[in-house]
Image (cartoon, rainbow, N blue to C red):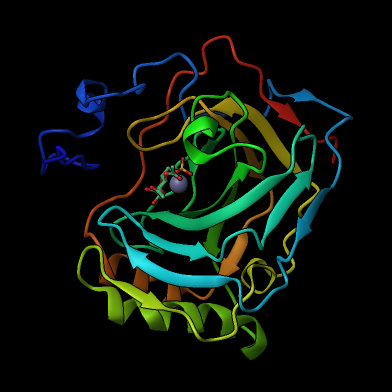
């Protein structure tokens, strides 16, 4: 059986011991997440706009699952794509998932931090190089592209149309209270709807890893500067219906890596 890993002290393999897991890269020199020190980032004019293919498709989510570590929304094969944005390849989007604290939205649960500020939640949209299998991609430094968006609670009450996609998504959570449960998605929900009006041209870029075991150093990271705003009642659904623990890895050493930023 595979050894269990977790985020806090309730299991043998918490983040301080992830490097002892089989096939682990978790003690590498290019690990994620990191703290982004905004005063030491390097402006890079070549970091332009992304091309998001089928982010507006309302039938792209195949099912939602409780992995025991996160809520993951798995997309239909070869439908959604990401390119541009300084990426050197076309990437096929596989899934998106979330990281949160024990009491989102009031607690802090993002993986990346900015000038040591930790946001309530973080959304990760995971894409794989189209020309490689997942196994191959995990062996390449740019095999995966993950888009990270911080999520914050809306301060004012949300307009109905902005709430609807997140309401639809979180309504599925009651069907996945058990670990490894899956629920097919029939509601119309697009990634564009979930992201709303967030600015996608303003972001940080660095080379890193998966933030969970086996921590493969295969990820081109994009962390967007502007936060996605979600109604706080809906953010509360995340810790309620899945693991009652923080679901973020502590920040890792930057070492000799450079963190780039769009000029905007
Ligand atoms: C989550 O645990 C996902 O469920 C994993 O997806 C994902 O691993 C892992 O996070 C790491 O991704 O963006 N946080 S992260 O670095 O995408 C992969 C699956 O296991 C390989 C399918
Ligand atoms: Zn993640």
Q: Quick check: can you spot residue 157?
A: no
Percent x, y for residue 214? 34, 31
Query: Which one is in front, 130 or 163?
Result: 130
The residue lying at 81 percent from left, 26 percent from top is: 43
Percent x, y for residue 93? 61, 53
Of the 4 image quadrants, the one containing the N terminus is top left
- Number of marks in the rendered image: 0
Q: Is residue 33 left or right of residue 12?
A: right
Percent x, y for residue 238? 35, 67
Q: Is residue 33 left or right of residue 158?
A: left
Q: Is residue 43 left or right of residue 186?
A: right
The residue lying at 49 percent from left, 24 percent from top is: 217
Query: Which one is in front, 114 or 171?
Result: 171
> Which residue ends up furthest to the right in the rendered image?
45
Q: State which quadrant residue 156 falls in.
A: bottom right
> Which residue ends up furthest to the bottom in the rendered image?
160
């Amino acid at each position: 059986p595979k050894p269990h890993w977790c985020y806090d002290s309730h299991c043998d393999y918490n983040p301080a011991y992830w490097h002892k897991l089989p096939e682990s890269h978790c003690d590498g020199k290019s690990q994620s997440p990191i703290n982004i020190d905004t005063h030491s980032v390097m402006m890079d004019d070549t970091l332009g706009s992304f091309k998001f293919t089928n982010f507006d498709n309302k039938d792209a989510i195949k099912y939602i699952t409780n992995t025991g570590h996160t809520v993951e929304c798995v997309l239909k094969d070869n439908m959604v794509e990401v390119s541009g944005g300084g990426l050197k390849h076309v990437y096929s989007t596989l899934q998106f998932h979330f990281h949160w604290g024990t009491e989102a939205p009031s607690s802090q649960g993002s993986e990346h931090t900015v000038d040591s500020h930790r946001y309530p939640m973080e959304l990760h949209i995971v894409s794989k190089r189209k020309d490689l299998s997942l196994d191959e991609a995990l062996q390449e430094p740019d095999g995966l592209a993950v888009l990270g968006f911080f999520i914050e609670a809306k301060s004012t009450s949300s307009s109905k149309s902005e709430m609807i996609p997140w309401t639809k998504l979180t309504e599925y959570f009651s069907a996945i209270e058990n670990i490894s449960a899956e629920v097919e998605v029939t509601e119309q929900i697009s990634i564009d709807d979930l992201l709303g009006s967030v600015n996608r041209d303003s972001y940080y870029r660095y080379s890193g890893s998966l933030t969970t075991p086996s921590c493969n150093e295969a990820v081109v990271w994009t962390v967007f500067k502007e936060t996605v705003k979600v109604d706080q009642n809906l953010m509360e659904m995340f810790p309620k219906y899945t693991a009652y623990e923080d679901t973020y890895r502590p920040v890792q050493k930057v070492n000799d890596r450079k963190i780039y930023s769009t000029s905007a």
